[in-house]
Image: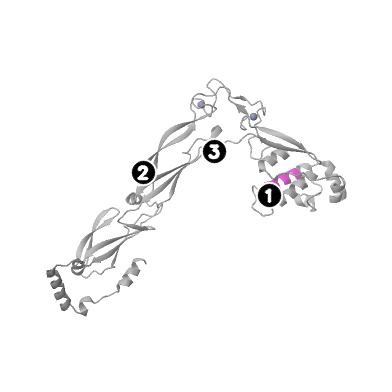
Amino acid sequence: MATSQRDYYELLGVSRSADDAEIKKAFRGLARTLHPDVSQAPDAEERFREVVEAYEVLSKPETRQLYDRYGHAGLQGGGFAPTTFDVGSLSDLFSAFFGDDIFGGGGRVRRERGSDVVAQIEIELAEAASGTTRNLPFPVTITCATCGGSGAKPGTEPVTCATCSGRGRLQQVTRTAFGEFVRSQTCPACAGQGTVVQDPCLDCEGSGRTVEDRTLEVEVPPGIHDGQQIRMSGEGHAGSLGGRAGDVYVQVRVTPDPRFVREGNDIFCSVDLTMTDAALGTTVKVPTLEGEIDLELEPGTQPGKLHVLRGKGMPVLQGFGRGDQRVLVNVQVPRRLTDDQRRLLEEFGQSASEETYEADEGFFQKLKSAFR
Ligand SMILES: [Zn+2]
Ligand SMILES: [Zn+2]
């Protein structure tokens, strides 16, 4: 029984006077966009089957005539049943309908792209800031130099595959009530290449590929973030039959620097001041990504005070400028006092007044501004 009651000409989007070429062209176009391999639409398979059915009917003069005269009823009366088929791969269906491969290659296996190589390198935060290079050694598959990738011993040639007569594909014909349905599959004897190697190359054992140790110089751009990947196009494993080589993906791990916390392009650090240095003012050494610098702190520096070193953060990856470095001041309060020290502090405490501690901004306000 026919699965579709819709008008076949409408389904293919052709006029009733369309010739064979127009029908074929319309079907090809529709099949390409509707095949479930391609279309994401939920009803893609159903629509695809309708279009195939319409093409089956309109592409054969007998069924087309029946349909033109008596419509769907005429076809049923004439014993027509649409071919049942698996919605397999699009290229299989095209070889079935047209005896060709829409992806080219004349029915032969496509040249395959080589595999990618995935590697990892570790760099320091300071190296991420300045940019760096790393040598990356890895084994890679290359085209065999002895046989040029054919797999045949030098002086010999691969011979035509006897199983498929060099076509690379085998066709299986199924008879149905409606007609012949041809399925084609990759020739198992030659894996679709159409040729077989009789005298294998000794260096690659007939595979056409060998393994070589290669060292790549990986350039890490300034400003890279932990976990980002660098892609090196075409540096991966060789493809088969002269197909394009794969890529190398280098994942960059930036090891945490105990002195800094990175947030985007900004970095944070803290400096410890003694209580007396904070009260009297001092100059401290502050680590930056490019070495230590002197930072002057005024008398009465409060815990939670934030100093922003403009442009001392990480460079913007593939951009301009740099982030900032934020320096958070911590004030250390003495924990173990001698008797003398305790007496001195008690004296100081008695002499101090509210004015001594007058604040311009609370600690919590400072802390909040540290996190913007
Ligand atoms: Zn070889
Ligand atoms: Zn074959």
Q: Residue 26 carries which label?
A: none
In this picture the colour scheme is one colour
Label 1 – label 3 distance at C-alpha: 27 Å
Q: Which residue is drawn at 71% across and 39% down?
A: 96
Q: Distance between the residues labelled 2 and 3?
A: 28 Å
Question: Outermost residue, top direction?
Answer: 155
- Which residue is identified by label 3? 113
Query: Which quadrant would residue 338 be assigned to in this image?
Result: bottom left
**Residue assigned mark 2:** 133
Image quarter for ligand 2 equals: top right
Q: Is residue 13 visible?
A: no
Taking depth in this image into account, of 129 and 189 the one nearest to the observer is: 189
Q: What element carries label 1?
A: helix
Give the magenta-colored segment's residue range.
Answer: 22-32
Q: Position of residue 205 (x, y in %)?
A: 52, 26
Comes first in the chain, label 1 or label 2: 1
Seen in the picture, residue 171 relative to 73 is either above or below; the reply is: above
Q: Is residue 107 magenta?
A: no
The residues tagged by marks 1 and 2 sit, at their Cα atoms, a distance apart of: 48 Å
Q: Which amino acid does label 1 sit on?
A: Leu
- Amino acid type, residue under disc 3 in the picture: Arg
Q: Residues within 10 Å of mark 3 (few under 14, many from 20)?
A: some
Quadrant of the rendered image containing residue 89: top right
Q: Mark 1 points at which residue?
A: 34
In terms of secondary structure, where does tag 3 sit?
A: loop
Query: Which numbered disc flags the more N-terminal residue, 1 or 3?
Result: 1
Q: Residue at x 73, y 37 (%)?
A: 182
